[in-house]
Image: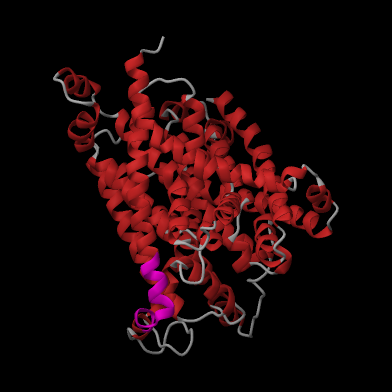
Amino acid sequence: MLIRQISDSASRRYRLLGTTLASLVYLFLLLPIVIVVPIAFGPTNGIAFPPESYSLDLFRLFLSSSDWIGPLLQSLKVAVISTVVVLLVGVPAAYGIARFQFPGKVVIAGAMMSSLVIPTIVTALGLYLYFSYLRITGTTFAIVLGHVIFTMPYVLVMMIAGVQKLDQNLEFGAQLMGATRLRMFRTVVLPQLVPSLIGATLFAFLISFDEVVISWFLAGPTTATLPVKMYSAIKWEISPVIAAVSTMLTAISLVVCLIMVALQKTTPSNG
Amino acid sequence: MIRTAEMRGAFFFVTPATLLTLTILAVPLFYIFYNSVGGAGLSLAAFRDLLSSGLFLRTLATTVIIAVSSAVLSLVLGYIIALHLTRQPPKRRSIYMMLVLLPFWTSVLVKCYAFTVLLGRAGLVNEFLSWVAGSPVQLELVLNRIGVLIGMTNYLTPFVVFPILASLLAIDPAVYRAATVMGAGPVRIFFTVTLPLSLPGIIAALSSVMVMGLGFFVIPALLGGPRDAMLSNLVDFYTRETLDWNMASAAGVLLLGLVVLVTVPLTILRKRKA
């Protein structure tokens, strides 16, 4: 209140300047996302904006051509499997890191998170060399392993934050009542972690589904994921079908984004 | 003193992820180092070849220039948004946040495709400029340095907003009131109060933006020309085009070294500020 009374027209002018600049930056951030949508509903013979006519032809083309549908299904498969694996491995690890003290904890946790600070191309090259030695490059299995390592830090960060909000006394209680560690984890810890689990699942799924660099190195001709197909399509031919693919990817991102925001609102400790 | 029960608990929960990290991350990284020195031969030939190759040195310079300029650009744009968000009441802030979160979650390929459409010779931006100028304008905005910088700045800005917003929201409003009562104008308040107090957020943003910027692969490949190739693209080139795994690994090791060289001082600085 006091600020309002004291502030003069100069500060109001700066405020207006700030809002104007911010609007321009929002526009810059959103423009590329918005622009592909009308193109996706345009004709199949060329990219024009705004399109002369609207139809679902590009989506039909996208979903009926085996060039695109194969990579789409491959991406779904890779993303689902890597999400399941990274949750199975990462959620207990996050609990262990959040709840226990053990020697080497900082080093171990740091190593698990390190793919965040290692350039993705370096991780991808390492995996490529190693998997070539093991003769598994080009397999779905190889891509899944790469994505598990890549998504692990995000799952850990989310789940560690989730565990730290829990009341540890419930866990002590369950163990005093004679529950085994696994049973205590399954019946006491996991149910309380549902919001964080949904968040981590969406995060892992979307990161894997959109991941380009690791897949680019590890995928073979029959195991190319949608981003790999898209990358080469943008590089070699700018086909309007890519607009339909982009619109679908953006719709998925929007849904994930909305769920994440809704999740944050249901968490009471959100300050 | 660590109790054995505690140790057993930790072992039970953390072992699977540790084994996976060792076998699927640590071993591959070791492979890069191993290959970069020519395997068991322990020769530094690949590094010598790289450091005397004009292509490598040019790419290294390009990488640093692009990473630093897109970091600076995205810091400025991100700061503008973070300031705007700070001034909103909480409810409206969460709505504006969506405008940052959606681009944050959008695939980099979608953005690259959109920018090739927007910035192309006959793209929307040129069409708009032609309309404004009343005569045909055909600026080269893509497949060159400008395209890369636009794409990278667009990609990095959301990553800047979150840490800076956090540190701006942590500033006690009483500080602003005090500064205003003492007669400081908005510009002076910004430079003597807001900016210094948000420094931890700026440093955090800078280090994450530099890590991403130095290692960028997709954007220079799709929005840049041949002269805008970055180290990541060079690694790809050695791996797939010339099939020289020793050179690819040596370039990877040097890229990793560059990232460490940039992030370690920033991390120390951040720890000291905190």
Q: Is A74 located above or below residue A148 in the figure?
A: below
The dominant secondary structure in magenta is helix
Does the stretch in magenta take in A65?
A: yes
Q: Nearer the viewer, residue B66 or B96?
A: B66
Residue A248 placed where, x, y %?
36, 70
Q: In the image, is A178 to the left or to the right of B246?
A: left
Q: Position of residue B74 (x, y in %)?
A: 57, 51
Q: Is residue A169 left or right of residue B107?
A: left
Residue drawn at (65%, 51%) of the image? B67
Q: Is residue A28 above or below residue B215?
A: below
Q: Is A127 situated above or below A90?
A: below
Q: Quadrant of residue B128?
A: bottom right
Q: In the displayed image of the protein, which residue is found farthest to the top?
A: B1
| Image point (41%, 30%), residue name | B173
Q: From this viewpoint, is residue A72 visible? A: yes
Task: Please provide percent x and percent y for residue B62.
Answer: 73, 56
* Residue B224 shown in magenta: no
Q: Depth check: give the residue in front, B54 or B154.
A: B54
> At 50% across and 45% down in the image, what residue appears?
B24
Q: Residue furthest right?
A: B52
Quarter location, residue A178: top left
The N terminus of chain B, quarter of image: top left
Residue range in magenta is A61-74
Q: In the rendered picture of this protein, how many numbered marks are placed on residues?
A: 0
Q: Nearer the viewer, residue A99 or A88?
A: A88
